[in-house]
Image: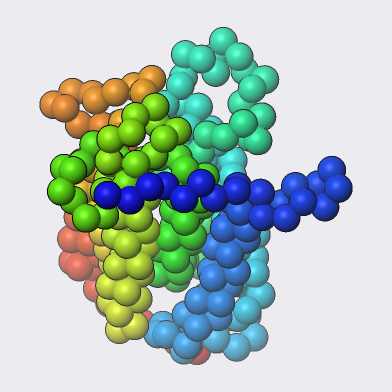
Amino acid sequence: MLMYPHIDPIALQLGPIAIHWYGLTYLAAFGLFWFLGTLRLQHEPFRSLGGPGGWNRKDVEDILFLGVAGVIVGGRLGYCLFYKPGYYLSHPLEIFMVWQGGMSFHGGLLGVIASMVWFARSRSRPFWQVMDFVAPCVPTGLAAGRVGNFINGELWGRFSSPDLPWGMVFPQSGSMLPRHPSQVYQFLLEGLLLFVLLWLYARKERKQGQVAAMFMIGYGMFRFVAEFFREPDDFLGLRALNLSQGQWLSLPMILFGVGLWLWAARRPSAVVTAR
């Protein structure tokens, strides 16, 4: 079995200013989104809709700015509402103390959706076209976030068999028994594998909403599977049917994604015109 390497969470100390690895993984996530977004402009229908008044790099920058706000605000509020509603209702000012930790992917997703609604309306773009543009650029950011989780030595997995070659001891968990390195599992599933599958799927023009639908289905399924190896939050434990909170939050994503894909498949193909 392996031993967690105790990585210093501070990457660089400049006097009183500490630059954390976790913050750098967020910067990496946003940088990867911008890079992939510029490549996405070459995919249909966005390439045919390019030019003055159409899809361009300024859109990528604006989407990134709004997406960052959505991730931070939605992720924080989602954590407070989905995981510790009673505590934060009693301590409302601590909602703003983001430096204490506590972010939720599902809340961040809702925040991004809200920000993309605003972007679509402000640019008179179809909402699902905007979401189809965004979806393939997201998984690499999720992968970067899981790297940050591993560096911080948080969100470790459930106990594994002593014979598992990659079973890892996380002393900060309070036990010296090997666990699944679930951060790595999520990095590989929700990050790299989902990116490859979604990027390949999105390279061919699809009906509006189908790329976004595949993201929700893929993320929901991979997260649901990974949660079987991830230690449930100690203040929540397992919920009904011995499923974790993350699994219960992922099920609506899967169902909505399937419904969205079927709905989009029945719609007539949109006519692409250069602008």
| Quadrant (top left, top right, bottom left, bottom right) of the C terminus | bottom right
At x 65% / y 69%, what residue is drawn? 61
At x 28% / y 41%, what residue is drawn? 179
Give the farthest residue toward the top: 90
At x 47% / y 80%, what residue is drawn? 40
Q: Position of residue 13 (x, y in %)?
A: 77, 51
In the image, is residue 90 above or below residue 123? Answer: above
Q: How many marks?
A: 0
Q: Position of residue 205 (x, y in %)?
A: 32, 81
Q: Nearer the viewer, residue 101 or 54?
A: 101
125 sits left or right of 252 in the view: right
Q: Nearer the viewer, residue 29 or 13?
A: 13
Work out whether residue 112 can be spotted: no
Q: Position of residue 50 (x, y in %)?
A: 55, 86
At x 40% / y 69%, what residue is drawn? 136
130 sits left or right of 68 in the view: left
